[in-house]
Protein backbone atom coordinates (compact mmCIF):
# COMPACT_ATOMS: atom_id res chain seq x y z
CA UNK A 1 0.00 0.00 0.00
CA UNK A 2 1.62 3.26 -1.11
CA UNK A 3 0.55 6.22 1.01
CA UNK A 4 2.26 9.40 2.22
CA UNK A 5 2.75 7.76 5.61
CA UNK A 6 4.12 4.49 4.24
CA UNK A 7 7.25 6.39 3.24
CA UNK A 8 8.06 6.33 6.97
CA UNK A 9 9.60 2.88 6.85
CA UNK A 10 10.45 0.25 9.42
CA UNK A 11 14.04 1.46 9.37
CA UNK A 12 12.97 3.98 12.00
CA UNK A 13 12.48 2.89 15.60
CA UNK A 14 8.96 2.40 16.92
CA UNK A 15 8.80 5.58 19.04
CA UNK A 16 10.38 7.64 16.28
CA UNK A 17 7.93 6.25 13.71
CA UNK A 18 4.99 7.02 16.01
CA UNK A 19 6.12 10.63 16.43
CA UNK A 20 6.47 10.97 12.64
CA UNK A 21 3.02 9.48 12.12
CA UNK A 22 1.36 11.81 14.62
CA UNK A 23 3.06 14.85 13.12
CA UNK A 24 1.81 13.71 9.72
CA UNK A 25 -1.72 13.54 11.16
CA UNK A 26 -1.34 17.11 12.46
CA UNK A 27 -0.31 18.40 9.03
CA UNK A 28 -3.45 16.89 7.50
CA UNK A 29 -5.70 18.19 10.29
CA UNK A 30 -4.39 21.76 10.07
CA UNK A 31 -5.64 22.31 6.51
CA UNK A 32 -9.21 21.07 7.13
CA UNK A 33 -11.80 23.74 6.32
CA UNK A 34 -14.81 22.35 8.19
CA UNK A 35 -15.70 20.02 11.06
CA UNK A 36 -16.92 17.39 8.61
CA UNK A 37 -13.72 17.63 6.55
CA UNK A 38 -11.64 17.38 9.72
CA UNK A 39 -13.60 14.35 10.85
CA UNK A 40 -13.24 12.56 7.51
CA UNK A 41 -9.53 13.38 7.27
CA UNK A 42 -8.78 12.03 10.73
CA UNK A 43 -10.59 8.79 9.87
CA UNK A 44 -8.73 8.42 6.56
CA UNK A 45 -5.30 9.18 8.02
CA UNK A 46 -5.85 7.06 11.14
CA UNK A 47 -6.73 4.07 8.96
CA UNK A 48 -3.78 4.81 6.65
CA UNK A 49 -1.30 4.99 9.52
CA UNK A 50 -2.71 1.88 11.20
CA UNK A 51 -2.41 -0.13 7.98
CA UNK A 52 1.12 1.14 7.36
CA UNK A 53 2.40 0.12 10.80
CA UNK A 54 -0.15 -2.23 12.44
CA UNK A 55 2.39 -3.60 14.93
CA UNK A 56 3.06 -0.29 16.70
CA UNK A 57 1.25 -0.24 20.04
CA UNK A 58 2.11 3.43 20.59
CA UNK A 59 0.51 4.39 17.29
CA UNK A 60 -2.60 2.27 17.86
CA UNK A 61 -3.09 3.39 21.49
CA UNK A 62 -2.68 7.06 20.58
CA UNK A 63 -4.90 6.90 17.50
CA UNK A 64 -7.64 5.21 19.52
CA UNK A 65 -7.55 8.00 22.11
CA UNK A 66 -7.62 10.69 19.41
CA UNK A 67 -10.59 9.10 17.63
CA UNK A 68 -12.60 8.75 20.84
CA UNK A 69 -11.73 12.24 22.08
CA UNK A 70 -12.61 13.80 18.74
CA UNK A 71 -15.91 11.93 18.69
CA UNK A 72 -16.78 13.22 22.17
CA UNK A 73 -15.83 16.81 21.28
CA UNK A 74 -17.84 16.82 18.04
CA UNK A 75 -20.89 15.44 19.85
CA UNK A 76 -20.52 18.14 22.50
CA UNK A 77 -20.75 20.83 19.82
CA UNK A 78 -17.11 21.94 19.66
CA UNK A 79 -16.20 24.18 16.72
CA UNK A 80 -13.40 23.67 14.20
CA UNK A 81 -10.74 25.83 15.95
CA UNK A 82 -11.42 24.06 19.25
CA UNK A 83 -11.13 20.64 17.62
CA UNK A 84 -7.82 21.49 15.92
CA UNK A 85 -6.42 22.91 19.15
CA UNK A 86 -7.52 19.86 21.15
CA UNK A 87 -5.86 17.45 18.68
CA UNK A 88 -2.67 19.51 18.72
CA UNK A 89 -2.50 19.56 22.50
CA UNK A 90 -3.30 15.85 22.78
CA UNK A 91 -0.63 14.76 20.29
CA UNK A 92 1.99 17.05 21.81
CA UNK A 93 1.17 15.60 25.22
CA UNK A 94 1.48 12.00 23.98
CA UNK A 95 4.85 12.65 22.32
CA UNK A 96 6.10 14.42 25.44
CA UNK A 97 4.93 11.54 27.66
CA UNK A 98 6.67 8.99 25.43
CA UNK A 99 9.92 10.97 25.47
CA UNK A 100 9.74 11.33 29.26
CA UNK A 101 9.05 7.61 29.70
CA UNK A 102 12.02 6.74 27.48
CA UNK A 103 14.31 8.95 29.58
CA UNK A 104 13.01 7.39 32.80
CA UNK A 105 13.41 3.80 31.64
CA UNK A 106 16.91 4.63 30.40
CA UNK A 107 17.98 5.70 33.88
CA UNK A 108 16.46 2.56 35.39
CA UNK A 109 17.96 0.26 32.77
CA UNK A 110 21.42 1.82 32.98
CA UNK A 111 21.64 0.92 36.67
CA UNK A 112 21.13 -2.73 35.85
CA UNK A 113 23.97 -2.90 33.33
CA UNK A 114 27.26 -4.16 34.72
CA UNK A 115 30.51 -2.21 34.85
CA UNK A 116 31.84 -4.10 31.84
CA UNK A 117 28.92 -5.12 29.66
CA UNK A 118 29.03 -6.64 26.20
CA UNK A 119 25.56 -6.23 24.77
CA UNK A 120 24.04 -7.68 21.64
CA UNK A 121 21.31 -5.60 20.09
CA UNK A 122 19.08 -5.91 17.03
CA UNK A 123 17.48 -3.37 14.71
CA UNK A 124 17.30 0.33 15.61
CA UNK A 125 15.93 1.37 19.01
CA UNK A 126 16.01 4.82 20.60
CA UNK A 127 15.17 3.23 23.95
CA UNK A 128 18.27 1.03 23.77
CA UNK A 129 20.40 4.02 22.77
CA UNK A 130 19.12 5.99 25.75
CA UNK A 131 19.87 3.11 28.15
CA UNK A 132 23.43 2.88 26.84
CA UNK A 133 23.84 6.66 27.00
CA UNK A 134 22.82 6.70 30.67
CA UNK A 135 25.12 3.76 31.44
CA UNK A 136 28.03 5.64 29.93
CA UNK A 137 27.22 8.65 32.12
CA UNK A 138 27.61 6.33 35.11
CA UNK A 139 31.10 5.51 33.90
CA UNK A 140 30.28 1.97 32.78
CA UNK A 141 32.20 0.44 29.91
CA UNK A 142 29.95 -0.90 27.19
CA UNK A 143 30.80 -2.84 24.06
CA UNK A 144 28.22 -3.89 21.49
CA UNK A 145 27.54 -6.47 18.85
CA UNK A 146 24.91 -5.17 16.44
CA UNK A 147 23.14 -7.35 13.91
CA UNK A 148 22.80 -6.19 10.34
CA UNK A 149 19.03 -6.56 10.94
CA UNK A 150 17.80 -7.65 7.55
CA UNK A 151 15.53 -6.99 5.79
CA UNK A 152 16.13 -3.27 5.81
CA UNK A 153 19.58 -3.31 7.38
CA UNK A 154 18.74 -0.76 10.08
CA UNK A 155 21.43 -2.34 12.25
CA UNK A 156 23.91 -0.16 10.36
CA UNK A 157 22.06 2.93 11.61
CA UNK A 158 22.13 1.51 15.15
CA UNK A 159 25.84 0.67 14.92
CA UNK A 160 26.64 4.20 13.77
CA UNK A 161 24.57 5.74 16.59
CA UNK A 162 26.29 3.60 19.23
CA UNK A 163 29.71 4.42 17.79
CA UNK A 164 28.91 8.13 18.01
CA UNK A 165 28.38 7.59 21.74
CA UNK A 166 31.89 6.16 21.95
CA UNK A 167 30.87 2.51 22.22
CA UNK A 168 33.15 -0.05 20.53
CA UNK A 169 30.87 -1.75 17.99
CA UNK A 170 31.08 -4.95 15.95
CA UNK A 171 28.50 -5.23 13.17
CA UNK A 172 27.57 -8.85 12.40
CA UNK A 173 25.37 -10.63 9.89
CA UNK A 174 22.15 -11.90 11.43
CA UNK A 175 23.12 -15.54 11.01
CA UNK A 176 26.21 -15.01 13.21
CA UNK A 177 24.18 -14.40 16.38
CA UNK A 178 24.63 -17.90 17.80
CA UNK A 179 28.32 -17.83 16.88
CA UNK A 180 29.06 -14.62 18.85
CA UNK A 181 26.67 -15.28 21.76
CA UNK A 182 29.43 -16.79 24.00
CA UNK A 183 31.10 -13.33 23.91
CA UNK A 184 27.92 -11.53 24.97
CA UNK A 185 26.95 -10.72 28.58
CA UNK A 186 23.45 -9.39 27.87
CA UNK A 187 20.97 -9.06 25.03
CA UNK A 188 19.37 -5.61 25.02
CA UNK A 189 16.70 -4.88 22.42
CA UNK A 190 13.76 -2.56 21.90
CA UNK A 191 10.20 -3.49 20.94
CA UNK A 192 7.40 -2.52 18.61
CA UNK A 193 4.80 -3.69 21.12
CA UNK A 194 4.39 -5.79 24.24
CA UNK A 195 1.39 -8.12 24.14
CA UNK A 196 -0.93 -8.64 27.09
CA UNK A 197 0.71 -11.97 27.89
CA UNK A 198 4.18 -10.40 27.93
CA UNK A 199 5.23 -11.57 24.47
CA UNK A 200 7.48 -9.13 22.60
CA UNK A 201 6.69 -7.98 19.07
CA UNK A 202 9.93 -6.80 17.50
CA UNK A 203 12.02 -6.78 14.34
CA UNK A 204 12.09 -10.19 12.72
CA UNK A 205 15.02 -12.16 14.10
CA UNK A 206 14.45 -11.06 17.70
CA UNK A 207 12.94 -14.42 18.61
CA UNK A 208 15.95 -16.25 17.15
CA UNK A 209 18.28 -14.06 19.21
CA UNK A 210 16.27 -14.79 22.36
CA UNK A 211 16.43 -18.52 21.62
CA UNK A 212 20.21 -18.40 21.14
CA UNK A 213 20.58 -16.36 24.33
CA UNK A 214 18.52 -18.87 26.29
CA UNK A 215 20.73 -21.69 25.05
CA UNK A 216 23.85 -19.75 26.11
CA UNK A 217 22.28 -18.63 29.42
CA UNK A 218 22.55 -14.96 28.48
CA UNK A 219 19.81 -12.75 29.92
CA UNK A 220 17.46 -10.94 27.55
CA UNK A 221 16.28 -7.43 28.49
CA UNK A 222 13.71 -5.50 26.43
CA UNK A 223 13.59 -1.71 26.74
CA UNK A 224 10.02 -0.55 26.17
CA UNK A 225 7.87 2.10 27.83
CA UNK A 226 4.38 1.12 28.94
CA UNK A 227 3.01 3.20 26.06
CA UNK A 228 4.04 0.20 23.95
CA UNK A 229 1.84 -2.23 25.90
CA UNK A 230 -0.78 -3.49 23.46
CA UNK A 231 -4.41 -3.17 24.50
CA UNK A 232 -5.53 -4.84 21.25
CA UNK A 233 -4.06 -8.17 22.34
CA UNK A 234 -6.13 -8.03 25.52
CA UNK A 235 -9.21 -8.47 23.30
CA UNK A 236 -7.67 -11.51 21.65
CA UNK A 237 -6.75 -9.53 18.55
CA UNK A 238 -3.73 -11.08 16.86
CA UNK A 239 -0.84 -8.81 15.96
CA UNK A 240 -0.69 -8.43 12.19
CA UNK A 241 2.85 -9.10 10.99
CA UNK A 242 3.63 -6.80 8.04
CA UNK A 243 5.59 -7.99 5.04
CA UNK A 244 8.37 -6.15 3.23
CA UNK A 245 8.92 -5.78 -0.49
CA UNK A 246 10.88 -8.71 -1.99
CA UNK A 247 13.17 -6.05 -3.44
CA UNK A 248 14.63 -5.82 0.07
CA UNK A 249 16.20 -9.21 -0.67
CA UNK A 250 17.61 -8.00 -3.96
CA UNK A 251 14.93 -9.71 -6.05
CA UNK A 252 13.79 -8.21 -9.34
CA UNK A 253 10.41 -9.92 -9.70
CA UNK A 254 11.59 -12.06 -12.59
CA UNK A 255 12.51 -15.00 -10.36
CA UNK A 256 10.39 -18.14 -10.65
CA UNK A 257 9.85 -18.53 -6.92
CA UNK A 258 7.95 -16.78 -4.15
CA UNK A 259 9.53 -14.61 -1.48
CA UNK A 260 8.22 -14.14 2.05
CA UNK A 261 9.65 -11.07 3.83
CA UNK A 262 8.16 -10.69 7.34
CA UNK A 263 9.31 -7.52 9.07
CA UNK A 264 8.39 -8.50 12.63
CA UNK A 265 8.18 -11.62 14.80
CA UNK A 266 6.91 -12.54 18.25
CA UNK A 267 9.19 -13.61 21.09
CA UNK A 268 7.42 -15.71 23.76
CA UNK A 269 7.52 -14.21 27.28
CA UNK A 270 9.40 -17.22 28.66
CA UNK A 271 12.39 -16.21 26.50
CA UNK A 272 12.48 -12.70 27.98
CA UNK A 273 14.09 -12.15 31.38
CA UNK A 274 12.87 -8.60 31.99
CA UNK A 275 11.13 -5.58 30.52
CA UNK A 276 12.74 -2.21 31.25
CA UNK A 277 9.91 0.31 31.63
CA UNK A 278 9.51 3.75 33.16
CA UNK A 279 7.68 2.02 36.03
CA UNK A 280 10.65 -0.19 36.79
CA UNK A 281 12.12 -3.47 35.60
CA UNK A 282 9.37 -6.07 35.49
CA UNK A 283 8.83 -9.66 34.45
CA UNK A 284 6.78 -10.11 31.26
CA UNK A 285 4.10 -11.86 33.33
CA UNK A 286 3.38 -8.54 35.11
CA UNK A 287 2.06 -6.84 31.96
CA UNK A 288 -1.64 -7.48 32.81
CA UNK A 289 -1.11 -5.94 36.25
CA UNK A 290 0.46 -2.82 34.74
CA UNK A 291 -2.34 -2.53 32.17
CA UNK A 292 -4.92 -2.72 34.96
CA UNK A 293 -3.09 0.05 36.85
CA UNK A 294 -3.02 2.24 33.73
CA UNK A 295 -6.62 1.75 32.64
CA UNK A 296 -8.27 1.10 36.00
CA UNK A 297 -9.82 -2.23 35.09
CA UNK A 298 -9.06 -5.66 33.68
CA UNK A 299 -9.66 -6.10 30.89
CA UNK A 300 -9.52 -2.39 29.93
CA UNK A 301 -12.90 -0.99 28.91
CA UNK A 302 -11.76 0.33 25.55
CA UNK A 303 -12.85 -0.35 21.97
CA UNK A 304 -10.43 -1.85 19.47
CA UNK A 305 -8.90 0.60 17.01
CA UNK A 306 -11.16 -0.60 14.19
CA UNK A 307 -14.24 -0.06 16.35
CA UNK A 308 -13.01 3.43 17.35
CA UNK A 309 -12.78 4.29 13.63
CA UNK A 310 -16.35 3.03 13.08
CA UNK A 311 -17.61 5.13 16.01
CA UNK A 312 -16.18 8.33 14.54
CA UNK A 313 -17.42 7.38 11.05
CA UNK A 314 -20.94 7.17 12.45
CA UNK A 315 -20.58 10.65 13.94
CA UNK A 316 -19.19 12.05 10.66
CA UNK A 317 -22.25 10.91 8.72
CA UNK A 318 -24.48 13.06 10.96
CA UNK A 319 -22.49 16.27 10.42
CA UNK A 320 -24.11 18.68 7.94
Image (tube, rainbow, N blue to C red):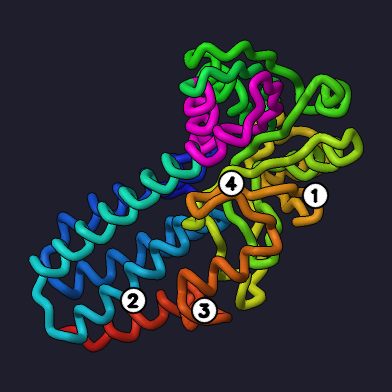
Count the numbered circles shown.
4
Rounded to the nearest angstrom, the CA distance separating label 1 from label 2 is 36 Å
* Quadrant of the rendered image containing residue 167: top right
Mark 1 or 4, closer to the camera: 4
Residue 186 location, x and y as percent?
A: 73, 31
Rounded to the nearest angstrom, the CA distance separating label 1 from label 4 is 15 Å
Q: Quick check: is 116 in the magenta stretch?
A: yes
Mark 1 or 2, closer to the camera: 1
Mark 3 element type: loop
In the image: residue 174, left or right of residue 300: right
* Quadrant of the rendered image containing residue 156: top right
Q: Which residue is mark 1?
A: 271
Mark 2 element type: helix
Residue 134 visible, this orientation: yes
Q: Which residue is mark 2?
A: 68
Q: Which residue is mark 3?
A: 300
Q: Quick check: is 291 in the magenta stretch?
A: no
Residue shown at 86% from the left, 41% from the top: 214
Rounded to the nearest angstrom, the CA distance separating label 4 from label 3 is 22 Å
Query: Which numbered disc covers residue 276?
Result: 4
Mark 1 and mark 3 in contact (Cβ < 8 Å)? no
> Looking at the image, which residue sits at the far right?
215
Amino acid sequence: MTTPYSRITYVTGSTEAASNALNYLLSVVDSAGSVRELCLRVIRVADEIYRARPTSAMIINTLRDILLQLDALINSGSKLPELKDAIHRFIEKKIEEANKATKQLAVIGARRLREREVILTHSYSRSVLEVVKEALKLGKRIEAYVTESRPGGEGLKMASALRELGVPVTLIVDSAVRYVMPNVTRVLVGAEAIAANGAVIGKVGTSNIALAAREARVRVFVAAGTYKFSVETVFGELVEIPEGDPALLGLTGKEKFKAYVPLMDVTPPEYVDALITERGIIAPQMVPIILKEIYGSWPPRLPEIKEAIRILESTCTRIQ
